[in-house]
Image (tube, rainbow, N blue to C red):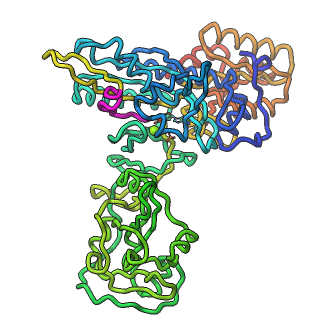
């Protein structure tokens, strides 16, 4: 491709709507162009990356027996009513009215279409297992479309769905797909960690996410040094890694006057105790339930995802205004006596069980209780694991570190949730009708484009891995000298004839501009043709990923380029 003819040239101003590094670099380099928040055009360079990523995914899904199909984007509302997800996923669903007042949903995921589709074709155990996939646009009305192509309102996804006669068969296939996913990331030049995560809106079972560590990530994941433990913070389990000596006997409850700030730290200092001796009480407003208080050790935090999973309800912590409104004193909240004042029940994090003689507020400014003990001075409904696991915690004896990460893929065991909703049964070898067991497997294709940019760049621009680079080679001609242009054009043609993908910057621009652009665009190999190189019957060879500039004889270039590409 001649750069002079390419749609989408570089620009040096960072677009004012670029909300992230990937958006800035991809837009400046002319790979994508934003139409609206979370909605992007893919220009030829971006499209080439997307196609290569898609091809890698196709090959790996085909290798595990996936059959490619294409399902509609527009879903009649009825199929969503069957699973009830038109009510549970309302925050992100795009709905639209069709002719004759029929309602439609723009597909955010395709369980509701694939299940009845496959049901029409699969009747007996002989037809199973079966697995189908598609690469297609998905629509989700993301409230915060703020991470460039990482979080689109319209975005590309490969979604695969598998159908099995038994849990064992699903488990075996699930593990094979997990391996296939790891190959996809590796081939895209990424290191992905397999992380245990929650099933979200898809299933109550656990799922596995594929996380790529970068600062741009919206997730926090906790990994042990040997990677044997890897968990999403949302559901992470672990023990705090600190000294906690506790051999006290229960002492008598006392009300004391105190002067202190509201923070746990100030509280601990004022009472001369460690922070874990302070009982933290967080009041939540729980959907359809009312107020629920959660008590936890002062040095720990409540994980609201765990709380929501436990209660199976949405929760929101009450802010100071709300606390005052219901007659409580922010900073001096205490479960002791609170139930006499307001209608509230308590649950405790497991950490509370092991501590005697806590310090708490007394629901009154300037007063605290000391020697507070659960069971004796206040009651909780249950002890539950609600702790937010952070860096420094331990799991299975291994210390965890916290990292920011991008969720680059997610696989789920669905069980019979969708086959039940659509009455999808098969006739087993014993003649009995049984529900089909399902799995689903998603990779964000457009998110992968952005993930690679976030994971692979420097101060000069993007650095594309060979496997997904729009072009392997970027030829730069220096100056408008005829002999130079001729030699550069010949190199361009020779490489193309040899099947090498080449971008040729044939513009009449200064060397400075062309080199800067080549760095920004990030093709793996830059070849420069100039008067100086011609005099030596050579070209200048430089890898974008690093290394020195090398002079290479023209006679060797073709063979060396092919060697580089195949390596
Ligand atoms: P997130 O937690 O980031 O919102 P999700 O868990 O809702 O994502 P899934 O339903 O698991 O996403 O979708 C499968 C894959 O599709 C994700 O792992 C991710 O790679 C991609 N994906 C999901 N939402 C988006 C989006 N808004 N834009 C781009 N890619 C997305
Ligand atoms: Mg997910």
Q: Position of residue 364 (x, y in %)?
A: 48, 84
Q: Quadrant of residue 521?
A: top right
Name the outermost residue toward the left: 430
Looking at the image, residue 323 lies above or below residue 104: below
Q: Quadrant of residue 176?
A: top left
Q: Quadrant of residue 460?
A: top right
Name the outermost residue toward the bottom: 257
> From this viewpoint, is residue 222 visible?
no
- Ligand 2's quadrant is top left
Q: Is residue 420 magenta?
A: yes
Looking at the image, residue 380 lies above or below residue 171: below
User: Would residue 541 be found to the left or right of residue 374 on screen?
Assistant: right
Residue drawn 39% across and 59% down?
389
Look at the image and give the residue range highlighted in magenta.
410-421
Q: Position of residue 424 (x, y in %)?
A: 31, 21
> From this viewpoint, is residue 12 visible?
yes
Q: Position of residue 380 (x, y in %)?
A: 31, 69
Q: Nearer the viewer, residue 51 or 41?
A: 41
Residue drawn 48% across and 34% down?
86
Q: Position of residue 480 (x, y in %)?
A: 86, 20
Residue drawn 32% across and 17% down?
130
Q: Nearer the viewer, residue 497 or 463?
A: 463
Q: Is residue 469 magenta?
A: no
């Amino acid at each position: 491709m001649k750069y002079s003819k390419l749609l989408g040239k570089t620009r040096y101003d960072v677009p004012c709507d670029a909300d992230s590094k990937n958006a800035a670099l991809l837009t400046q380099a002319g790979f994508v162009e934003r139409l609206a928040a979370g909605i992007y055009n893919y220009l030829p360079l971006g499209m080439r990356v997307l196609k290569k990523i898609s091809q890698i995914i196709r090959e790996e899904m085909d290798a595990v027996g996936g059959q490619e199909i294409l399902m509609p984007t527009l879903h009649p509302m009825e199929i969503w009513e069957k699973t009830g997800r038109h009510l549970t996923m309302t925050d992100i669903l795009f709905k639209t009215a069709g002719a004759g007042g029929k309602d439609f949903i723009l597909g955010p995921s395709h369980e509701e279409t694939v299940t009845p589709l496959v049901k029409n074709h699969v009747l007996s155990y002989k037809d199973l297992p079966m697995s189908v996939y598609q690469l297609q646009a998905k629509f989700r009305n993301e409230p915060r479309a703020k991470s460039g192509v990482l979080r689109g309102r319209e975005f590309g996804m490969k979604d695969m769905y598998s159908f099995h006669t038994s849990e064992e068969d699903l488990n075996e296939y699930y593990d094979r797909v997990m391996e296939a996913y790891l190959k996809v990331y590796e081939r895209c030049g990424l290191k992905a960690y397999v992380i245990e995560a929650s099933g979200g809106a898809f299933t109550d079972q656990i799922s596995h996410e594929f996380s790529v560590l970068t600062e741009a990530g919206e997730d926090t994941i906790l990994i042990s040094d040997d990677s044997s433990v890897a968990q999403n913070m949302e559901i992470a389990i672990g023990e705090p890694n600190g000294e906690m000596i506790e051999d006290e006997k229960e002492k008598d409850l006392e009300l004391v006057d105190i002067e202190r700030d509201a923070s746990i730290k100030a509280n601990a200092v004022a009472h001369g105790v460690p922070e874990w001796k302070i009982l933290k009480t967080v009041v939540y407003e729980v959907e359809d339930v009312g107020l629920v208080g959660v008590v936890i050790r002062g040095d720990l935090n409540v994980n609201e995802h765990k709380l929501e999973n436990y209660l199976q309800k949405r929760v929101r912590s009450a802010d100071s205004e709300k606390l005052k409104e219901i007659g409580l004193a922010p900073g001096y909240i205490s479960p002791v006596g609170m139930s006499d004042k307001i209608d509230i029940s308590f649950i405790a994090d497991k950490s509370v069980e092991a501590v005697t003689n806590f310090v708490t507020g007394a629901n009154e400014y300037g007063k605290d209780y000391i020697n507070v003990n659960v069971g004796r001075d206040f009651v909780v409904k249950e002890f539950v694991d609600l702790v937010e696991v952070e860096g420094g915690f331990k799991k299975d004896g291994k210390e965890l570190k916290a990292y920011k990460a991008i969720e680059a893929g997610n696989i789920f065991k669905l069980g019979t949730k969708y086959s039940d909703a659509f009455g999808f049964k098969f006739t087993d070898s014993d003649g009995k009708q049984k529900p089909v067991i399902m799995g689903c497997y998603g990779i964000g294709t457009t998110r992968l484009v952005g993930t690679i940019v976030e994971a692979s760049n420097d101060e000069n621009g993007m650095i594309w891995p060979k496997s997904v680079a729009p072009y392997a080679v970027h030829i730069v001609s220096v100056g408008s000298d005829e002999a130079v242009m001729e030699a550069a054009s010949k190199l361009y043609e020779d490489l193309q004839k040899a099947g090498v993908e080449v971008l040729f910057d044939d513009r009449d621009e200064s060397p400075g501009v062309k080199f800067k652009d080549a760095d920004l665009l990030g093709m793996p190999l830059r070849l420069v043709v100039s008067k100086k190189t011609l005099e030596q019957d050579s070209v200048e060879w430089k890898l974008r990923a690093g290394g020195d500039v090398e002079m290479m004889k023209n006679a060797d270039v073709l063979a060396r380029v092919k060697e580089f590409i195949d390596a």
